[in-house]
Amino acid sequence: MKISTRGEYGLRALMELGLEPGRALSLRDIAARQRISLDYLEQIVPALKTAGLVKARRGAQGGYLLAKDPAEITAFAALIALEGPLDPMSCLASGDDQSQGCLASNSCAVQEVWREMKDAVELVLRRITLAELIERQKQRFGVPIRTYSEREIMPLVVLN
């Protein structure tokens, strides 16, 4: 199972919004802070909006802001919105997608391993909230999550 840049950048965009609750940020600002392509970010954010994780504000002070408290947004909800189902193998897909699975589906020990793996990943992602990610970032690194070069980060990191 591999999370794409869509999932990574979407989580980072949510963290940016969570750092400034109640303040709308432009996608241009988020893209610049994260060194993400604005065009790519414009493709990612609608999925977060559709999932009810962000909302848009129009006008002079417009932009995007979180639609919920950061403690109510899980990494799981964000990644499902951005990536879709987190099935590591097609044999775990439900509904019409299951037809793409293998003929041994539901009678295979290997499939049980894939299900255990999926369940373990989902357990972790459902437990971690955006608020926790933001706090973890502050506590462990002392700087906002940004895409820095090594030269830029060295003066920012406080060594214990």
Image (cartoon, rainbow, N blue to C red):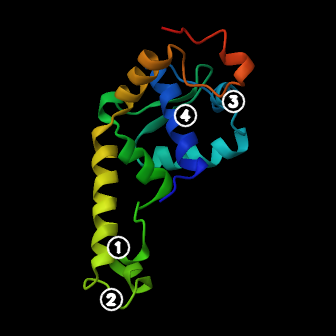
Residue 18 in percent (x, y) is at 45, 25
Q: Which mark is residue 104?
A: 2
Given contact means CB atoms under 8 Å apart, are the residues at marks 4 and 1 in contact? no
Q: Looking at the image, is mark 4 or mark 2 nearer the viewer?
A: 2
Going by the numbered disc 3, the residue's amino acid type is: Arg
> The residue tagged with tag 2: helix, strand or loop?
loop
Real-space CA distance between mark 3 and mark 2, rounded to the nearest whole angstrom: 49 Å
Going by the numbered disc 4, the residue's amino acid type is: Ala
Residue 23 in percent (x, y) is at 50, 19
Residue drawn at x 34%, y 52% is: 121
Nearer-the-camera pick, 61 or 52: 52
Q: Is residue 38 visible?
A: yes
- Establish if 39 lies above or below 2: above
Real-space CA distance between mark 3 and mark 1, rounded to the nearest whole angstrom: 38 Å
Residue drawn at x 72%, y 44% is: 39
Q: Looking at the image, is mark 1 or mark 2 nearer the viewer?
A: 2
Residue assigned mark 3? 28
Given contact means CB atoms under 8 Å apart, are the residues at marks 3 and 4 in contact? no
Residue 90 in percent (x, y) is at 43, 75
Given contact means CB atoms under 8 Å apart, are the residues at marks 3 and 2 in contact? no
> The residue tagged with tag 4: helix, strand or loop?
helix
Residue drawn at x 50%, y 38% is: 11
Residue assigned mark 4? 13
Name which of mark 3 and mark 4 comes first in the sequence: 4
Residue assigned mark 1? 92
Going by the numbered disc 2, the residue's amino acid type is: Ala
Name which of mark 4 and mark 2 comes first in the sequence: 4
